[in-house]
Amino acid sequence: MFELRCISCGQSYSNDVVIFNCSCGGLLEVLIDINKISVKKRDLSRRPLGVWRYKEFLPIDPDDHIISLKEGGTPLYRGRNIGRMVGLTELFIKNEGGNPTGSFKDRGMTVGVTKALHFGSKFVCCASTGNTSASLAAYAAKAGIKCIVLLPSGNIALGKLAQAILHGALVVEIKGNFDVALNLIRKASKDLNLYLLNSINPWRLEGQKTEAFEILEQLDYNVPNTVLVPMGNCGNISAIWKGFKEFYEIGFINKLPRMIGIQAEGASPVVEAFKNGREDIIPINYPNTIATAIKIGSPVNAPKALQAIKESKGLIESVNDNEIMKAQKLLARFEGVGVEPASAASLAGVIKLCKLGIVKEDERVVCITTGHAMKDPEMIFNNYEKTIEIEPRIEDLRKILKT
């Protein structure tokens, strides 16, 4: 029904092997035999919306104990107010901040931690810019297994750090950036027998492809023309593209969307590779952006992202921190959707690409927003309007209201 396959050389591996890279060094993906899936659209519609609504498309054995916090089923909002501002008649916001720990990572962790139990793992681990650690800590707690997370010291948003601590993870701060932490945890997973759940784990990405399934159902199978995704370690855009392809292959839709990846300007090695026609990236040693969730200089899933862009005839663009903050404010104040800075990169990309004429007025556009605003509260306090303190007198309040 399913197996692992290298995206570089095509070598296959059994689904019972704990492996994260091919012997050639290439990335692995899960190959699902679509021809053996017999579920119909009407079958799906009778089930609760969420990741496990699509169980036939997920690489889990029938006797596996599923670890779930009721993830998925996130809202798809019609962004009419911002749509009018930027000249789009059909703009939608898929708000992944509605997941149990407040980010899209929960979709992957329900499958990834379930798979960890399948392999008999007692310890799970990850490196993180924040959201992965928060999600893994929660799902490990639900599963009753130990969790260790490595974080770049001084570069984690307080809300995310608090979640990891609250859920009982062993939190270790590393003197270095995310890429340094990831290199260390990858070595530790081998040497110390820890089950790695960063997005290099192909099983985890299978949960994240359900974003595409939900978008299609929520749009009554009217396929978007364009889907924009913030890119950090670059696993999510490839997962979402895989989801669209699987619904296409089974015959649920008859066309596919264009995928557009958006990176922060100070952490955009994949943008540079794409624009120069290269298949490899030149890492950025010191990535710098206010969007900490995508502050990654050497994304391990860049080959998968570039493949998704090529297959979908899409593109990759960067936006600067000012554009990200403007988009975050627009989402909050004109649509009522509060997201962390990295999430707003997708809308910032829409605004930029509309001005360039790359995204057209008549397109059906979906922006993926990846995490809740309260993931990074200090950014709001540091960059937005300050509170006002007055004496408890009606005259003082009247003066403020007049201004």
Image (cartoon, rainbow, N blue to C red):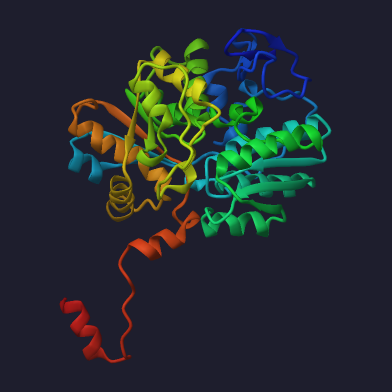
Report x, y in % for residue 187. 72, 34
Task: Say if 251 sits above or below 235 in the image.
Answer: above
Q: Quadrant of the C terminus?
A: bottom left
Report x, y in % for residue 287. 45, 42
Judging depth in this view, the residue of 347 and 176 nearest the camera is 176
The residue that appears at 37% across and 51% down in the rendered structure is: 337
Report x, y in % for residue 238. 50, 24
| Image side of residue 15 versus residue 234, left or right | right
Task: Say if 283 sits above or below 245 in the image.
Answer: below
Q: Quadrant of the N terminus?
A: top right
Identify the residue at the far left of this view: 402
| Image side of residue 307 versus residue 396, left or right | right
The residue that appears at 54% across and 58% down in the rendered structure is: 159
Report x, y in % for residue 142. 73, 47
Judging depth in this view, the residue of 221 and 84 nearest the camera is 84
Q: How many marks?
A: 0
Does the rendering let one see residue 65? Answer: no
Which image quarter: residue 197? Answer: top right
The residue that appears at 49% across and 45% down in the rendered structure is: 293
Does the rendering let one see residue 118? Answer: yes
Which image quarter: residue 15? Answer: top right
Which image quarter: residue 267? Answer: top left
